[in-house]
Image (cartoon, rainbow, N blue to C red):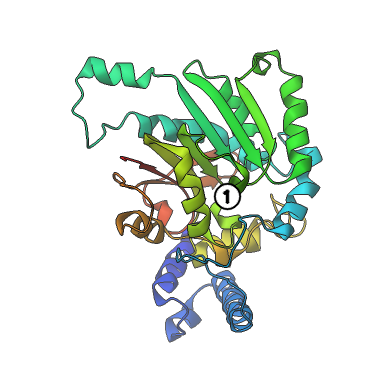
Amino acid sequence: MAATVLGPLRHAAKGAGTCSIDALRTPPMTRSCLRALALERARTQRTTSQGRRYHSSLTTDASTASSVSASEVTHFSRLASSWWDPHGPSRLLHLMNPLRHDFIRSCLQRPSPDTCLSEPDIEDANEKRRSYLDVGCGGGIFASSAARLPTTSRVTAIDPTESVIQVAKEHQRSDPALAAPGKLEYRNCAIEDLPDGATYDVLTVFEVLEHIDSPSSFLETAIPHLKPGGWLIGSTISRSPVAYLTTKLIAEAPLIGVVPRGTHDWNKYINPPELRGYFESGRAPGRWGEFVTQGVVYVPALGWRFVQGSEEFGNYFFGVQKLE
């Protein structure tokens, strides 16, 4: 079924909301997805005309004073008690976590365009102890695993949702490996509340940008906390009809869904060229290296898998090095 649905939907994505007779020849499930997507677009246009910002373009919205959305905080507060249940609503995050580390390693092993390293130098760079700032850490799935790495000097993990930070701290207290002073610190705050001058080697924003009303304002606030030579690494979702089908109509479906309803807003998804353009156009503060992406696909019974090219229509990792 996936192959049947995927082709017409990818073709429809190029139409960007236009209606053609080709859509009438698509399978019933695809037509249902496209109808739902059309309704979503209509809703977006109505709310936009009323002054609300939808659509995750990376233009600066100076009127956004905070990256925190009250509705997002409320939603994730409901998930706090089940955050560490590997079979609960956060199951997909637990399954994705090993791929996060694989992608980070692949980024850190890339030679910087400003340096020419020999093989021994590259090996030394790979063993360097690094500090992490994990923004939107939730209950600490990634932050706690990063803190356990022998190459990690410290992890600061922040989230604006108080209840999930309490869950993260309780999990930390239950694990002696995370109890060393200064190794892992959780803070209940937004990125705007971090003190100036606190900088890190790796800044992670996993499953964050699709929950932010103004991604450019958020990134411009976060970037000063990244050291020159450090990496900004995250994951998000492409704004495509395929993503609407998989993350909204299937993943949030009653009874069969794998994530709670209301977890995602398709209008806030960001396509890789939009993120790449933000860094390559000079709008992002500083100077940046190559923008790297890697698509990931969830396969039932097998888990998440890297699939080259799938970043065009679904979940993907991205990484970019801050050169100065």
Vertical side of 60 occupied by 109: above or below? above
Q: Is residue 296 visible?
A: no
Residue 302's image quarter? top right
Q: Residue at position x 36%, y 30% from top?
A: 108
| Percent x, y of residue 253 | 71, 60
- Nearer to me, 242 or 66: 66
| Percent x, y of residue 45 | 58, 81
| Percent x, y of residue 235 | 50, 46
| Percent x, y of residue 202 | 46, 34
Vertical side of 107 occupied by 263: above or below? below
Vertical side of 85 occupied by 60: above or below? below
Q: Residue at position x 31%, y 59% from top?
A: 281
- Nearer to me, 29 or 229: 229
Label 1, secondary structure: give it. loop
Along the horizontal axis of the image, is 68 left or right of 12?
right
Q: Amino acid at mark 1?
A: Val
Residue 141's image quarter? top right
Identify the residue under disc 1: 208
Along the horizontal axis of the image, is 75 left or right of 321?
right
